[in-house]
Image (tube, grey):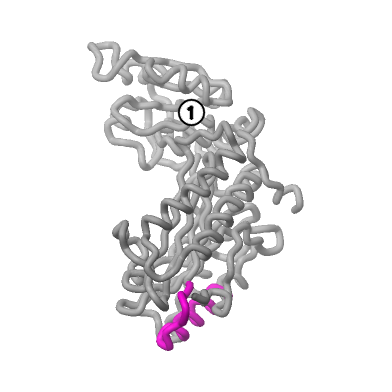
Amino acid sequence: MVSKLKSIKVPPSKEELNNRLEKVRSLMHRENLDYYISFNPVNIYYLTNFANNVHERPFILVIEKEGPPKMVVPLLEKSHVETRALCDLEFFSYYEFPAPKGENWFDQYQKLIKNNKTVGIESAMPMGIAEKTQGIKIITDIIDEVRIIKTDYEVGRSVHACKVINKGHKEVLKMCRPGVLEFALYQKVTGLMTSKIIQDIPEANFMVCKTTAAVWPPSFSHDPHIIPKIFAEMENGGPHVSIVYAQVDGYGVEIERTFFLGEIPQRAKKPFEIMYQARDLAYTLLKPGENMGEIDKKVRKFITNNGYGDYIIHRTGHGLGITGHEAPFLAEGYDRQLEPNMLISVEPGIYIPRLGGFRHSDTVLITEDGYIKLSNAPEKLDELIIEL
């Protein structure tokens, strides 16, 4: 376990990327696929270390049963891919989009797939690309499946990323006082985290670096996905809910806390306690072999039995990895068992209009016999009433 918790800051090795590719090919073999096609920039990044934004010039990765994957790329971006990709690739470039007849991206693309072969495509593939894909098409999310179980390298990258958000969250609690503006918090803390990323990883790819730091004051903390006004002010009392997230050179982690400034309103004490106990319940269930849908069901039942069922508006947790939201999910209807090296959030919440929201969230690694929290911040109520 010590090796798994080592902080890693370097890019993936060719061996790491080759192992990911072989896992994809193993699932291709299981599903009797001759080809697998990826358009999703997240999945392409996972297999190659090259990050791109979706636009009118598509990047398409074609994986066969053996040999280097083939990448269809716009000529404008070919050198960019060659610079960032850390695996073996064969390039098939097209000049531009739109292009004269015979010189479009799909003219290159269709040459790479033999007729009457079985081709796996991602469920999120755009229809325009799916229609240009030859062969017998089967929708299957093989790369997403491989991403669910993290390698030790990925765990190490997430350990480092949590050091960034731990520092950011500590500054949030230090800075947050009544009257402080949302924009001031965001500017100071995201700047702090970005500076740490640059100091730790001078060659970080900022296409896969993001930082977010905000606090929802009690006037709207019951609405967890609202976009706050930049001049919203922190308030006396609470509940305030912090949201600190970072994608650190390609690895996404988060930490969130419910806290109070100066005092805690009497009405907020019970829902805080029920949220805290629901979170504890979830943690007691975090071990390999436990069904993730059942965990969410039990947590929801606990909150409901304590009178707050009408104020549950989301699942108990979600996966983390090279994005901030991905499989697996602690959610009813997700019939899958926990396994070692899954990386998840744990964040049951209670949201009461005209009172506020109650949610802690941590980045959590599933281990052989339980779990380890990679993020770190105060948790108990007496630690989260900030003296003024």
* Residue at x-position 37% and y-position 60%: 182
Q: Secondary structure at mark 1?
A: loop
- Tell me which amino acid carries mark 1: Asp
* Residue at x-position 43% and y-position 41%: 140
Is the stretch drawn in magenta largely helix, strand or loop?
Answer: helix
- Residue 310 on the magenta span: no
206 lies left or right of 155: left
The answer to whether 114 is drawn above or below residue 352 in the figure is above
**Mark 1 lies on residue:** 34
Compare residues 219 and 63 and report the one nearer the observer. 219
Extent of the magenta region: 259-280
* Residue at x-position 62% and y-position 30%: 18
- Residue 262 on the magenta span: yes
The answer to whether 365 is drawn above or below residue 44 in the figure is below
Residue 54 place in picture, x, y as percent: 35, 33
Residue 293 visible in the current orientation: no
Rendering quarter of residue 24: top right
Compare residues 156 and 313 and report the one nearer the observer. 156
Residue 189 place in picture, x, y as percent: 48, 53
Rendering quarter of residue 369: bottom right
Residue 25 visible in the current orientation: yes
102 lies left or right of 202: left
Residue 225 place in picture, x, y as percent: 34, 61
Residue 114 place in picture, x, y as percent: 41, 20
Compare residues 56 and 35 and report the one nearer the observer. 56
